[in-house]
Image: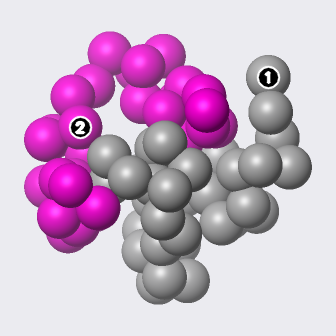
Amino acid sequence: MNTPLRAARLRKGLTITHVAQQVKCDMGNLSRMERGKQRPSLELAERMVIFFAGELSELQVLYPERFKD
């Protein structure tokens, strides 16, 4: 599943490792979130929205299945 989170990361040309470090998240957890296999906490979703400077909404991070390409 191509989630809005993965799409935003790829648009910016960033690695999972870099994003995970910046939002203080385990790289494996972030990978699962990008594949729609795991949901972030509300706090982590907020950190991701801030990191991606508004390219993503909290809803897109928390409920990626609602935003399929």
- Count of picture labels: 2
Image coords of residue 28 (percent x, y): 20, 55
Q: Residues within 10 Å of mark 2 (few under 14, many from 20)?
A: some
Image coords of residue 25 (percent x, y): 23, 66
Image coords of residue 34 (percent x, y): 46, 44
Q: Which mark is residue 16?
A: 2
Residue 55: image quadrant is: top right
Label 2: state its secondary structure: helix
Q: Residues within 10 Å of mark 1 (few under 14, many from 20)?
A: few
Residue 26 is at least partly visible in this image: yes
Location of mark 1 (residue)? 69
Tell me if residue 21 is in the magenta stretch: yes
Q: Are marks 2 and 1 in contact (CB under 8 Å)?
A: no
Image coords of residue 62 (percent x, y): 66, 66
Q: Looking at the image, is 52 positioned above or below residue 48?
A: above
The reply, left or right, for residue 16 in relation to residue 58 is left
Q: Main secondary structure of the magenta part?
A: helix
The reply, left or right, for residue 27 in relation to residue 2 is left
Determine the CA span between mark 2 and mark 1: 20 Å
Tell me if residue 38 is in the magenta stretch: no
Q: Which residues are magenta?
A: 1-29
Label 1: state its secondary structure: loop
Residue 1: image quadrant is: top right
